[in-house]
Image: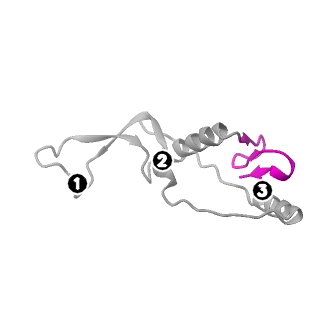
Amino acid sequence: MDFDEVFAPVARIESVRLLLALAAQEGWRVHHMDVKSAFLNGELQEEVYVRQPPGFVVAGQEDKVLRLDKALYGLRQALRAWNTKLDETLGALGFSHSASEHTVYARGEGASRLLT
C-alpha cells in the first residue's frame, strides 16, 4: 500500500517573523536548532517493509525483506510519524498546540512563557 499524499507541516514565514518580532519587543532570547536526524525518531504505526539495502544483504537470505519500526529518510510516512511523535512529546511536557499554526507550541504565562 502506498500513500497519495505527503504530510509536511512547515512554519509559514509570517509566523516566523511574528515570533521574532515578539521576541525582539519583549527582549527574549532566541535559540535556533536543526536536528538532522529528527525523522529517524518517528515511530511508524503501519507495517512498512523494505528490501535489504546494498552492502547489508544477509548471505543466503537475499530474498527476505525488513520490517521497519522507525521511519527512514525518503519514506512517505516519515514526516507524519515525526510530527506525531513531536506533538505527543511536547504535549506531555505541557505545551499547547496553536490552533492557527501547526508548527507553533506554547507553555507558561507572562515572563515564564516559552514558545516553540
- Amino acid type at mark 3: Ser
Determine crowd level at label 3: few under 14, some 14-19, many 20+ residues with C-alpha closer than 10 A. some
Q: Earlier in the sequence, mark 1 or mark 3?
A: 3
Please state which of residues 14 and 90 is positioned toward the viewer in this rendering: 90
- Amino acid type at mark 1: Phe
Q: Which mark is residue 41?
A: 2
The residue at the point 64 percent across, 37 percent down is: 92
Queried whether the magenta region covers residue 39, the answer comes back as no
Q: CA distance from mark 1 to mark 3?
A: 43 Å
Q: Earlier in the sequence, mark 2 or mark 3?
A: 3
| Coloring applied to the structure | one colour
- Amino acid type at mark 2: Asn
Q: Residue at the front extreme? A: 112
Q: CA distance from mark 2 to mark 3?
A: 25 Å
Determine crowd level at label 2: few under 14, some 14-19, many 20+ residues with C-alpha closer than 10 A. some
Helix, strand or loop status at disc 1: loop
Camera-near label (2 vs 3) is 2
Helix, strand or loop status at disc 2: helix
Q: Which residue is mark 3?
A: 15
Q: Which mark is residue 56?
A: 1
- 27 is higher (above) or lower (below) than 74: below
| Residue 10 location (% of width, % of height) | 65, 53
Determine crowd level at label 1: few under 14, some 14-19, many 20+ residues with C-alpha closer than 10 A. few
| Image quarter of residue 70 | top left
Task: Magenta stretch: give its range.
Answer: 95-116
